[in-house]
Structures are given as C-alpha cells and as structure tokens.
Amino acid sequence: MRRRISIFGSTGSIGQNTVSLIEDQGGAETHEVVALTGARNIRLLAAQARKLRARIAVTSDPTRLAELRAALEGSGIEAAAGPAAIADAASEPVDWAMSAIVGAAGLVPGLRAAESGGIVALANKESLVCAGALFLATCARHGATLLPVDSEHSAIFQALNGERHDAIERIILTASGGPFRDWPREAMARVTPAQAMAHPNWDMGQRISIDSASMFNKALEIIEAHVLFGVPSERIEVVVHPQSIIHSLVGFRDGSIMAHLGPSDMRGAIGYALNWPVREPLPLDRLDLAALARLDFCAADPERFPALRLAHEVMELGGLAGAVFNAAKEAALDGFLAGAIGFLDMSVLVEHVTRDLGREAASCGSEYSLADVLELDRRARVAGRAWIETCVGA
C-alpha cells in the first residue's frame, strides 16, 4: 500500500532533499503525494509536482498563482496560493508529512498536519519554540507521531532509543560555530549578509545560514530540545565542534555519553524520519574515521554569541516567551538583510523586545491558544520594526 505524504516547504533545502529521497524510493510509484508547497520558486515547485504527480501544489505568494497554474497546465494538478491555501492543504489527511516551512509561517501548517494523526517530520523548529505546549498537546490529542528532523534533535532522539528519561543527565548540542567562530567582535560588527550566508559545513537556505552564523539557529535548537525531551534549561549545553561530524550527544547519570556521528548531510536525519521505525539504506557518504583523524571541541562563547544566553533566559521565562523571541529574531534578520542594522545589532534588538514583552508572554503559562501565539508574534514584530526605525533615525 502506498503511503500518502505531503511536503510543506518542498522547494527549500530540506524539502528538496526530501523529494530526492522519495524519488530514490520509487517516487510516485511508491508514494501517493497529496500536497507540495513552496514560495517563489514556481518553476521548481511545478517540476516537483509533475514528477511526483502531486494532487495539489501551493505557493505562499498569492501574486504567483497565475504563474503556477500556467506551469501546471495540462497536468491535472490543482494549483492554489496564499497562507490559507497552505493551511487547507495541510488539513488533507496523510500518513507522513514533512514540515519544512522556514520560520513562524510553518506553525499553522504543522498544527494542521498533526491533526491528521499521522507522522509529522518536523524540520520547522519554530513550531516548538513558539508554541511547544500547544503543538505537543495537538499531537497527543490526535495520535500524531512527532519525529525531529533537525540533525541535532534527530541525533538525540536516536541516542535515547530504549533509554529511560530519568537516566538523562544532560543534553549536549554541537555547533559548527559558523563562519565567524574565530572572529573578534569588532570584525563581526562589519559582517555583510553575503559573508553570513557562507556556512562552512552545511548547504542551507539564506535565512537559516545567517541564523547559524549568529547562533540564533542554535538558540532555537536549545529551546526545541527543552520542549522535545523535557530536559530543564540548566542541563542543556552547547559545544563548538567545527567538523560537524558529531551531531549531538546525550550524557547519562552513570557518567556515560552517547554520541551520534554521521556526515554533514541533512539526508541522514530526513531519511531516518522518512523510514522510521526501520533503518533503510541511504545514499550518503560513509565516514572514514582514519581520514578524519581528529574531532575538535571548544566552548561556545556567549559574549560573542548572545543568542545562546538569551535562549536560556527564554526557557526560564516559559509560557510564550519563545514566540516573542522568535518573532523578534525574524524581525532582526529582516532588518539585517535590508541593510538597516548590523550583524551584532540583531541580538541587541532581540534582547530588547524579549525583555519588553517577555514577562507578559510568560504569564500565559502552558494554557494558551493559537490566537494568543499569533498576537504575541505580531506585537513582537511591530516592536522589532520600531526598534529598527529608531536605530535608522538616530
């Protein structure tokens, strides 16, 4: 029996790798592809939809609907556009859904996919950062299985297979350190978006690459680990590991540490989620440990990368502080890409907005609605843009 699948964010780096793995496993002959969604790369979205014989293809940009319809003409594939159309596509029942839309925009489709009660392969960490309690409760209520696709969290998930939760002593997330791990702060102040996009190990999209360079991506992963694995803030650590071969580690109360090693290739984590609970062959390079010769580690510097410190403050606040933190981070990244603020200004903006709205957000506790999340997200973005305007006008 063919599995019904949907991929949300199919034209991004995670989505493209997911499509590639599905094609390796027989494509449309072995999978019933219900929905594919993308943003502005209409040509790629249409090509994917035709190749996998998807039932629905959706672009997030309503102005590109006519272009998508033209690209799909004669295929019989339904075309749609806009966030509401993506949410409707996510409501279509499937057995397996990849949630790979970048940013808070992936929250609603992820929740809709969870309501189908199938497997949700979660690459959109913002869903758990912004609304972790709501997302987990939705999965539990509808019997959905949540599988992490971030390489770090997939590694932890695999290391914990068969282990008791009360045996966990600490979780250690690895970070490559990005392109600026050895730069002094004064040099980082002059970083351009093009420099920040040049990740040394991973092939990722623009926004994720810059978030990795600033360590905001790692900050989100710290919060995600806290939500996914129920480990308190003080027992989640980050260590810089330039080779990106060890994807994460779990320390246990007997003093042992379980490490997950693999090539710097997201198809490993995607393929694990795609085939779970069975391990199937994947088209990845095999590690040559003798050729690697060494694996290096050093402490992450919270002075040069304040995002790491802010992540722990957000976890201590709880409630919807994560939604404020993420929205402020996205506003800061927009400002940096537009040339309105500098690289180091991003963390200043996020700290300002998080501390301004954080206490109110924390007061929500774990009892909040999607409307509460979206309202705080909106207010944090407004506050972030206002801070940028103040800086530009100064």
Image (cartoon, helix red, strand yellow):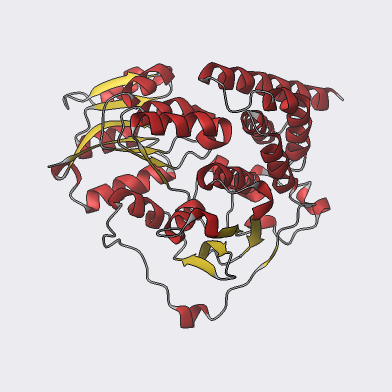
- x, y percentage for residue 368? 56, 21
Any part of residue 299 in sight: yes
Instruction: Looking at the picture, tell me which residue is in the foreground, 113 or 41.
Output: 113
Question: Where residue 289 appears, x then y in whole percent?
Answer: 46, 79
Q: Quadrant of the N terminus?
A: top left
Residue 138 versus residue 309 in the image, above or below: above
Q: Nearer the viewer, residue 318 or 165?
A: 165
Report which quarter residue 66 is drawn in.
Answer: top left
Residue at image coords 63%, 33%? 322
Residue 248 pos. (x, y %): 53, 60
Vertically, is 78 above or below 278? above
Which image quarter is the C terminus in?
A: top right
Query: Can you give x and y, in whole percent of width and height, for residue 276 in the image?
Result: 30, 52
In the rendered structure, the answer to whether residue 21 lies left or right of residue 166 reads: left
| Residue for point 72% across, 25% down | 384
Q: Which one is in front, 196 or 154? A: 154
Count of labels in the image: 0
Residue 33, quarter of picture:
top left
- In the picture, measured across the screen, residue 235 lies left or right of residue 340, that is left
Q: Quick check: 16 left or right of 315?
A: left
Res 38 seen here: no
